[in-house]
Amino acid sequence: MEWLDAFLASGIRFTTPILLAGLGCLATAWTRDLNVGLEGAMIFAAFFGVVIGLSTSSWVLAVVLTILLGAVSGLLFGVVVTVLRVNVFVAGIVLNVLGAGGTVYLLRSMYGVKGTLADEGIPAMARFDIPVVKDIPVLSGLVSGHTALTYLSWILTVLVGLAVVHSVAVRRLKAAGEHPDALATAGGSVTWMRIAAQSWCLALCGLAGVQLSLGQLSLFTEGMTSGMGFVALAAVIFCRGRLVLLAVMCFVFGLSSAAGVQISEDVMPPQFAQMIPYVVALLGLVVLAKRSPEGQLRIATPTMES
């Protein structure tokens, strides 16, 4: 059963950044300003998490400051797509391009290295073994031996679920996307709701990125997100605003990523094995396209002022 424990543990590790980014992006789906720049935000966060970790020797400070950087970046992104009226799809693509190229430039200009920044001074996130559970087959791989951000992603999923049912803020986020006129008439600010959604999105992308660089590897590698932001985006599109389905899809994609890593070369060439999560995501979107009417998720920004 050791192979199963290892596979499940790997699946959970891959699920964590996908789920965190997906939870962030979900808010932008509610406001109908779907942020497609998750990949760029995550790679920036992974880089700055390492930079802050090297400077402070503390993974806790790295996590906190990366969240703050993500939240502030989200505010700026929200202003760009709401106040300046830049199309959110175009803005997201620009963020992805900046993330891919900007981190390569910063890595070489700040540290003079190409490819990978690995240093003994980069702090690694602590992993927590849960007593009793860690000795139970299967369950140990699922629940025990993970970083704080993995457990935080589970807590956030529950809290978002409760907020969907009980929170006025979530109702206003959805109203900003579905019924902006009604929200404005009731005295709410459509613009601020849309900006807040983008801030929440990039703050959680910050968590996702720092989980990759400090939680899984304790280093930074160019392109280390490996398309996880796009996989999270696919999960959000597939779930159509439903939290439970989002969590399930993120777990499926996480297991698919783990399978792609652990499949032996004797079974399948590694290049094909690494394609597994993206093939799963593509199949999911094909199923969605076949079963759903057009127009379920608007990508362009609303033009309503508030």
Image (cartoon, rainbow, N blue to C red):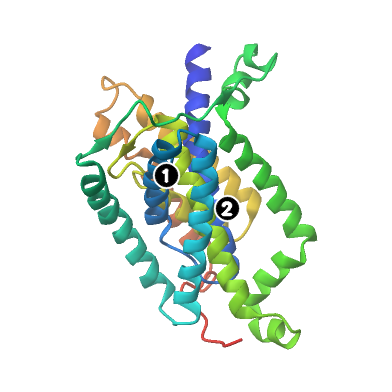
Asked whether the residues under the numbered discs 2 and 1 touch, taking CB atoms below 8 Å apart as contact, a structural biologist would say no
Q: Which amino acid does label 2 sit on?
A: Leu
Question: Residue 11 location, x and y as percent?
Answer: 49, 31
Instruction: Look at the image and tell me in which quarter the C terminus lies.
Output: bottom right
> Is 242 positioned to the left or the right of 270 in the image?
right
The percent position of residue 16, horizontal first and vertical second, equals 52, 39
Write the residue at 33% across / 38% down: 220
Q: Name the residue under label 2.
A: 23
Query: Dot 2, crowdedness within 10 Å: few (<14), some or many (≥20)?
Result: many
Q: Position of residue 110 (x, y in %)?
A: 26, 46
> Can you tell which of label 2 and label 1 is closer to the viewer?
2
Of the residues shown, which amino acid type is indicated by label 1?
Val
**Residue at the spot x=77%, y=67% of the render?**
168
Q: Nearer the viewer, residue 162 or 286?
A: 162
* Disc 1: which residue: 280
Horizontal side of residue 53 vs 120, given as left or right? right
Report if residue 243 is visible in the image: yes
> Is 116 on the left or on the right of 259, as rendered?
left
